[in-house]
């Protein structure tokens, strides 16, 4: 098998129908020690057992609520609460030089400070002419870009002109150099084709007039917006700064390098969260691993300078799950305490101070991703006062089993139906709460309603931010 075939097979392994019967969940401790063998054929892949249910309870059995609380917030409501919470924090707009505005959000509409173009401009290198030809011209370089107003043209006159130069008053057209023939001896200009009045002139104000609204408040400053702002006369922009985030990774069992050993596992969330949060529009101040030390957690959260603290792990009710007890003693207001979503149901959102919030992500890695998209993304969007994007929906190729009462988030990849050419989403295998293999091959997460979806159903898709964002 060559490398390319091997790659395709690797992706196909992650791709699988998830509408097959769910496998029996092995009792704790009886799960096969060896991972599924690599490089199987797609047909074999479909038949693979699906190691995608959290140990201890199945998708059909929601299990006990973490921390003993029973009132989980419905998924859509949790997202709305997070967005509202962010928007309720007053924005702190400031004026920054263009070079510092990238990735921030416009606090005011971008209004043209000038006409664009601000003068009638030649769109081509060639000749500015007045009236019908042939035309008389004078020797010389003619009119160059960046020069002050040239002399008006008289009828029957032509002058050489460069792209971007001001067109003289009374010019009727610009003729591209390759469409004209200059008789050097007689200083006469002849045209090789018909001349249309106004051709190759960009009239003043063609793109906008002074005062025109170019972009609404809330637009993200992209490289293209920086260019437009500069063209429209801006040196500084009023922007809402990117919210700041500090990531606190909890768990004594986590290793930051090397192979898992002695019951310890590699920290998968430290490396994942900072770039993901940046792609969601945050500035990540720091990522720290705190172990399972309640004092360290307390000190770090109460001492944070970030707008948002994101914790991972410790959200459930285990002996070293310190997040709930800490929030209770810190007098934090729990805005969302558990969400009706699989994976990720123990996620939480708390207000620590009027302008400081904490998002508690569950420790299981895909559950943490679920919390990131359910709570952190709308909270950061609200804090940055970015508009809510239109939900994006796509048909799913395969049926997806649902949870009886909770929403499921299932990694999917976008594919083109080879028969019809239509786009559809294909649910990925390895979508269990502790797994990242599916999401690493995914283009998005399908929002599967309670009860599940049938093949062809249109589901909301949460896009992964790398398609639209930068990682810096
Ligand atoms: N009695 C109950 N136990 C659990 C419930 C429940 O409802 N009742 N919910 C389960 C679910 S669902 C989840 S999700 C987890 C959430 O637990 P925590 O947020 O407290 O997370 P931990 O216990 O610290 O870790 C869970 C799991 O994830 C691994 N982990 C943690 N951090 C990382 C990391 N940075 N990188 C990689 N893996 C990580 C950790 O080793 C555990 O295996 O609770 C269930 N329990
Ligand atoms: O199912 Mo938990 O919610 O593993 O995330």
Image (tube, rainbow, N blue to C red):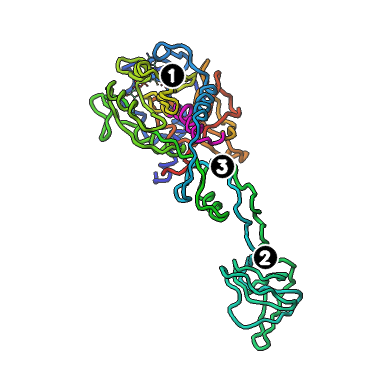
Circle 3 packing at 10 Å, graded few (<14), some (14-19), many (20+), is: some
User: Of the residues under marks 2 and 1, which one precedes in the sequence?
Assistant: 2
Q: Is residue 378 magenta?
A: yes
Q: Position of residue 313 (x, y in %)?
A: 35, 23
**On residue 333, which mark appears?**
1
Which residue is depicted at the point 47% across and 33% down?
Answer: 380
Foreground mark, 3 or 2? 3
User: Of the residues under marks 3 and 1, which one precedes in the sequence?
Assistant: 3
Q: Which residues are magenta?
A: 369-387
Q: CA distance from mark 3 to mark 2?
A: 33 Å
Q: Is residue 467 something one can see in this rendering?
A: no
Q: Position of residue 323 (x, y in %)?
A: 35, 20
The quarter of the picture where residue 286 lies is top left
Q: Position of residue 310 (x, y in %)?
A: 39, 29
User: Of the residues under marks 3 and 2, which one precedes in the sequence?
Assistant: 3
Which residue is depicted at the point 63% across and 65% down?
Answer: 123
Q: Residue furthest left?
A: 262
Which residue is depicted at the point 74% across and 67% down?
Answer: 197
Name the residue beneath numbered marker 2: 201
The quarter of the picture where residue 283 lies is top left
Q: Position of residue 261 (x, y in %)?
A: 24, 28
Name the residue beneath numbered marker 3: 108
The quadrant of the picture showing ligand 2 is top left
* Circles 2 and 1 in contact, beta carbons < 8 Å: no
Name the element at disc 3: loop
Q: Is residue 127 magenta?
A: no
């Amino acid at each position: 098998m060559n490398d390319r075939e091997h790659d395709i097979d690797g992706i196909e392994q992650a791709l699988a129908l998830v509408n097959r019967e769910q496998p029996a969940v092995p009792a704790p401790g009886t799960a096969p020690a060896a991972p599924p063998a690599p490089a199987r054929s797609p047909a074999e892949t479909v038949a693979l057992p699906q190691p995608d249910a959290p140990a201890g309870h199945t998708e059909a059995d929601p299990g006990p609520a973490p921390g003993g609380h029973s009132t989980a917030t419905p998924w859509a409501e949790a997202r709305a609460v997070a967005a509202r919470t962010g928007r309720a924090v007053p924005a702190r707009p400031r004026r920054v030089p263009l070079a510092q505005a990238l990735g921030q959000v416009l606090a005011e509409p971008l209004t043209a400070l000038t006409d664009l173009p601000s003068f009638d401009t030649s769109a081509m290198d060639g000749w500015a002419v007045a009236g019908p030809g042939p035309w008389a011209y004078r020797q010389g370089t003619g009119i160059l870009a960046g020069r002050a107003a040239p002399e008006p043209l008289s009828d029957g006159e032509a002058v050489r002109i460069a792209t971007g130069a001001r067109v003289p008053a009374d010019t009727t057209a610009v003729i591209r150099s390759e469409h004209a023939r200059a008789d050097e001896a007689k200083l006469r200009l002849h045209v090789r084709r018909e001349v249309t009045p106004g051709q190759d002139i960009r009239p003043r104000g063609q793109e906008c007039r002074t005062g025109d609204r170019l972009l609404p408040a809330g637009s993200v400053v992209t490289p293209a917006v920086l260019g437009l702002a500069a063209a429209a006369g801006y040196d500084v922009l009023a922007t809402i700064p990117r919210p700041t985030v500090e990531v606190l990774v909890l768990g004594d069992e986590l290793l930051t390098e090397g192979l898992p050993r002695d019951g310890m596992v590699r920290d998968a969330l430290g490396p994942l969260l900072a770039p993901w949060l940046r792609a969601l529009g945050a500035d990540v101040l720091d990522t720290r691993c705190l172990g399972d030390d309640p004092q360290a957690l307390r000190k770090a959260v109460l001492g944070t300078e970030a707008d948002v603290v994101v914790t991972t792990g410790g959200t459930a009710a285990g002996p070293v799950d310190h997040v709930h007890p800490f929030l209770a003693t810190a007098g934090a207001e729990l805005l969302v305490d558990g969400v009706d979503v699989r994976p990720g149901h123990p996620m939480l959102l708390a207000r620590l101070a009027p302008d400081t919030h904490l998002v508690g992500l569950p420790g299981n890695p895909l559950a943490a991703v679920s919390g990131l998209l359910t709570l952190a993304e709308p909270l950061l969007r609200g804090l940055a006062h970015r508009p809510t994007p239109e939900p994006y929906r796509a048909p799913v190729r395969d049926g997806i089993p649902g949870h009886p009462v909770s929403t499921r988030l299932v990694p999917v990849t976008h594919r083109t139906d080879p028969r019809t050419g239509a786009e559809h989403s294909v649910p990925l295998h390895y979508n269990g709460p502790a797994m990242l293999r599916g999401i690493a091959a995914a283009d998005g997460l399908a929002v599967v309603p309670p009860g599940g979806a049938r093949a062809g159903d249109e589901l909301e898709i949460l896009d992964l931010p790398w398609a639209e964002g930068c990682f810096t």
